[in-house]
Image (cartoon, rainbow, N blue to C red):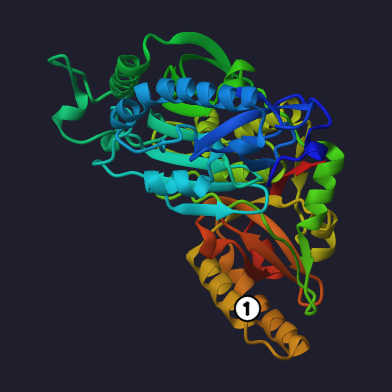
Amino acid sequence: MILRASSVTLLLGILSLSAEPLITLQEANGSDKLKVELLYLEKDVALLRRADGQEFKTPLAYLAEDSRTEIRTTWASHRAGIEKHLEPLNKALGHPLFSKRGNIWNEPIDLVAKRLKLPLESKTPFTSSFRLYTRDTYSFAGAKPKTIVAYGDHKGRTLSLSVIYSNKGDSLSNVGSGEDHFKTDGKEIDRSTLKGAMDYDAASIAHTLTQILGEPLEQRMLGQGNKSNKVQRWDWNGHSFLLANVKNEYVGLNIVRAAFADGGGRFSRVSDSEMKVRLKGSVTSKENGDVYIKNIPMVDQGPKGYCAPATFERAMRHAGVPADMYLLATLATVGGGGTNTAKLYDEVAFTTRSKGGRTAREISLKSLSPSKIKRYIDKGIPVLWQMRSLSRYNQIANARTRARHSVKNWPAYSAQIAQAAEKNAPLLQTRANHHICMIIGYNEATNEIAVSDSWGLRYAIRWIHMAEAEAVSNRSGFVIDI
């Protein structure tokens, strides 16, 4: 896009979301001025961004001499500051997080995730995530994390990174490996305690970042639920590294925009009217009677027993409320796993209300009839369902979902699965394998519901007859409503 007089009729305000320098442009033969962010300069062509987010390239030859001089001088100074820390910081992190441009906020999340070797977890038109459950050989910022996840925004750009290290939800037997993980300055740390593992990780990360970026500041940041946590903060080029060591809970490193850290963790929420349109637009209907919600973020709970926190993260992000499975887990998880669902309900309700302006509440699910759940599904709101995920139940759901792809006669299929469900239901009644997942759709003609589990994209949608679902239901659930 070439800068023309029509583009500079107003002196625009500028976004304060990145660390890119501001410059004032003026065309060679014009008097109007435009304040923009200077994103990059290469071969006398500047990449610029206006306050409305529009990016465009402009050859310096099109600009007034003062503007050309300002761009060259500003860029030289800006690059000097970046290059001083870029390579040392990447080396200290143990990964090429930053490209030569030095600002991940102006990069597609796909590229950042590729450099960190994070596999895609989920991508929708509004959010994306790349998550890695690490092995003992993986290190980040001088310590060994349990997981690392990168989030993308609705424009496909990098939004934030979350790295979780020692935490109460992980088995202590899996906290690191080998003696080197628990040694510092010649002193061994008692690895038999969670505190010992957390102390090591926090000290190691702080030492790593301080060597490159200097001494940290201390501040409080809003966390998940009704909590705020004290963090150590290091800033570099519009990025804030926030290290939290929450007693008896977890050690985590968040990499966020400096503007977000300046706000103490508060985010700009999507308006109710916009969210209603977004949610309604996520509902799709098929000729066979299937109605289901698409574009729900997937969160893969991986090797963790975190079905509840993972499912809540999915629902919260679907409703426009940022969430992190691991941090949600610390609110209501005992050491080694297992979630107090009632406590998690309370914490999520507080978060969605106070931070996202959404209404979160428990609901009765005495009946799973499509006519009962459609009131939520038709608005684009998934139902979080407490149930018992038995092997027999999963075998039925998997087989039923595969069979649906080849159905030609849907009335015949409906009669067939009704007979099968009548036989299956008594065999599914047990008190074992407590689980929480999502009901995301229904078919009134076949009396089926669509279910989504936090086990990866393969389980994004499966179908089960209402009678079979009611046989494994705990008859309660949760919704985040608008």
Residue at the location (70% across, 47% down)? 477
Residue at the location (46% across, 35% down)? 101
> From the viewer's perspective, is 370 left or right of 312?
right
Considering every residue shown, the one lying at the far front of the view is 29
The foreground one among 31 and 164 is 31
Query: x%, y% of residue 148?
Result: 42, 39
Camera sees residue 158: yes
Count how many numbered circles sit on residues in the image. 1
The foreground one among 308 and 342 is 308
The foreground one among 444 and 89 is 89
Q: Quadrant of residue 320?
A: top right
Using a 10 Å C-alpha cutoff, classify the residue at mark 1 as few (fewer than 14 neighbours), some (14 to 19) or many (20 or more).
few
Query: x%, y% of residue 316?
Result: 67, 41
Camera sees residue 265: no
Query: x%, y% of residue 361?
Result: 76, 38
Task: Classify 232 as above or below 476.
Answer: above
Residue at the location (66% across, 23% down)? 266
> From the viewer's perspective, is 1 left or right of 138?
right
Task: Classify 209 as above or below 104.
Answer: above
| Quarter of the image where the C terminus is located | top right
Considering every residue shown, the one lying at the far left of the view is 186
Q: Secondary structure at mark 1?
A: helix
The foreground one among 72 and 260 is 72
Q: Amino acid at mark 1?
A: Lys
Query: x%, y% of residue 331?
Result: 54, 28
Q: Which residue is mark 1?
A: 423
Q: Quadrant of residue 372?
A: bottom right
